[in-house]
Amino acid sequence: MKMREKNLRSQLRPSLPTAVRSSRERGPCDAELRVLRQRIRQEGVRALPPQVAPLVSPGGVEEVAERRALRVELRVDAGLGAAAGPLRRAGVDRAERSFGDREAVVSVHQGVRKTFSQVKEESGLVAAGLLAAGLEPGDRLGIWGPNSYEWFLTQFAAAKAGLILVNINPAYRPSELEYCLNKVGVKGIVCDEKFKTSDGTFRFRDLYEAGESSHRKRVDELSSKIQFDSACSFQYTSGTTGLPKAAVLSHHQIVNNAYHSIGKRIGYGEKPHRICLSVPLYHCLGCVAGTICGMLYGATCVMPSAGFDPDAIVRPLEREKIASCYGTPTMFVDILNSFRKNPTDLSVISTGIMAGAPCPRDLVTAVNELRMKDLIVMYGMTETSPVTFQCFPSDPPEVRSSTIGFPGDHIEVKVVDESEEIVRAGEAGELLVRGYCNFLGYWDDPEKTREIMTQDRWLRTSDLISIQPDGYGHFIGRIKDMVIRGGENIYPAEIENFFLGHPDVIEAQVFGVPDARMGEEVATWIRKAEGSSLSDTELREWCKGKIAHYKVPRYVLFKDEFPRTVTGKIQKFKMREQTIEELNLKA
């Protein structure tokens, strides 16, 4: 890894929305919440009293700042949320005291193993080195590279030094990298050695010895000065429809999301876990659900490879005694295929997380082959730090395979119609979220921030969701993806999930294309299983009697690859453009 300084004149602190506050009392415990959840009625109103919320940041910050937590109402026809247990503080120092010589991180491809004690010591040295290199608290430090121990260590060292870590996808090309650096005024960048393009750099290892006693003392002093609600991470959105935006997250948001919405519910506090991080660290699924969860719960983060490699993931499942495995739906498709070709002992693994994109029911069920009986499906977005809905391991398989779960602790949610009126339970509408998890805003982009955040701090997800009387959510689709064919509303996610039930279909994407008579017609791109001879006629015939006639795609195109962002998200607008051009349709 290399680090080089980049002097830019950008000023810190654009105008960002303030955090929400409310009253303070104690809330119910998990058992009470579960009983209450069972008693929700469609017309009923249940109010949960708010809570005291001790908060602080990761990266060695140990001072507790008490803050009032949100009052959460359980009212299915008007909004829904859950609160259980106080919000948390976390730190590398605390993890070292609690877990000491337990392995904190394993980088299989680098041959690196480090304990929590070693991570605490080395993160402090690197933090001092970053200050010695000329960085100051509040500066933006870019990190541009694949999964590695250096990436893991930099996340906590940057937090200790009061820096804001700018997470940059290693797949970005020079023009994309330049945009990201200039957008937020990056002052220094940590990057993989192969990305070195100029002199004026020095080796990452040199940071261990760069800091003097004065710098190490300053790092210790910062542990009581860094504010819990200060920005600590910039996450670039995927840019599926335009240039990426820099979402600003605070210590408070990512620590508590990792603790309450992820680790606590999945059961990381019940016994030590070893987590296979097959997802990239620059993504929230890696650096919040992975590294921060590990630091909070004493879980070991195992990185099997620098980038996604299904074969490299399957092999360590046995050798590293993996108990939990993370992945997007597409990743799990590839992991399953690799496991089927080269089976291994899976006697230890029991759980994991599937997230990052809509999770098809058939795929969630198929993952049982990996013996992940307690697999958790999560729902969220970068702007909510990231998780807002998640199942419980105790939920029956049919619930975990067909819903996005129950709202996270300390989070309010509501579903509204086009008139901003809250819908009744079971009805579909746009999901809005409010709570500690809502990001601070888009860096230096107040207009885009106002578009997604209402004045009373409800965050618009642009997702169509229905919430049932029991509080569980059902994902219907993206509002912008909805197809209107002859007055009928068609939700692509429903048809995509249906197609995945065909044995020859590996992946399906559905979208609308223009039609003179119907306004829009349904089109689908299909990725077939290897060696399949499936035709469009056979696929349509298979649909008969299973789904409504108007949902059967008029256009079926078989493709080996789909257009994606560098983070792997599907770009349906490009599919639409290509289909219109290929079929000579009039836009």
Image: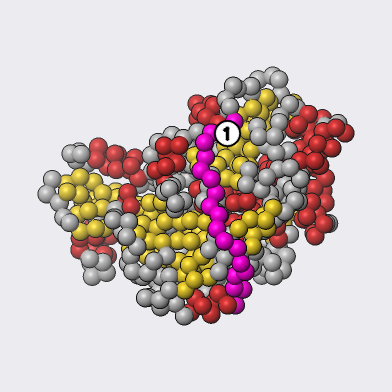
Determine whether, in the image, residue 407 is placed left or right of residue 515: right
* Residue 30 lies in the magenta stretch: yes
Residue at the top extreme? 199
Q: Quadrant of residue 209?
A: top right
Camera-side residue: 214 or 326? 214
- Where does residue 207 sit, x and y in percent of width and height? 78, 32
Q: Which residue is at 16% across, 55% downward?
A: 486
- Which quarter of the figure is the C terminus placed in? top left
Determine whether, in the image, residue 508 is placed left or right of residue 35: left
Determine whether, in the image, residue 258 is placed left or right of residue 149: left
- Residues rendered magenta in the picture: 12-31
Mark 1 Cα within 10 Å, few/some/many (few <14, many 20+)?
Answer: few
Magenta stretch mostly in which secondary structure?
loop
In the image, what residue type sits under mark 1? Arg
Residue located beneath label 1 in the image? 13
Residue at the right extreme? 213
Camera-side residue: 51 or 222? 51
Q: Which residue is at 76% across, 40% downward?
A: 222
- Where does residue 173 sit, x and y in percent of width and height? 52, 30
Q: Quadrant of residue 232?
A: top right
> Number of callouts in the render?
1
* In the rendered image, the vertical position of residue 322 relative to residue 303, given as above or below: below
Q: Is residue 497 visible?
A: no
- Where does residue 58 sit, x and y in percent of width and height? 70, 49
Local secondary structure at mark 1: loop
Determine whether, in the image, residue 191 is placed left or right of residue 417: right
Q: Which residue is at 63% across, 33% downward?
A: 140
* In the rendered image, the vertical position of residue 243 relative to residue 254, given as above or below: above
Camera-side residue: 18 or 276? 18
- Where does residue 187 sit, x and y in percent of width and height? 64, 27
Q: Is residue 72 visible?
A: yes
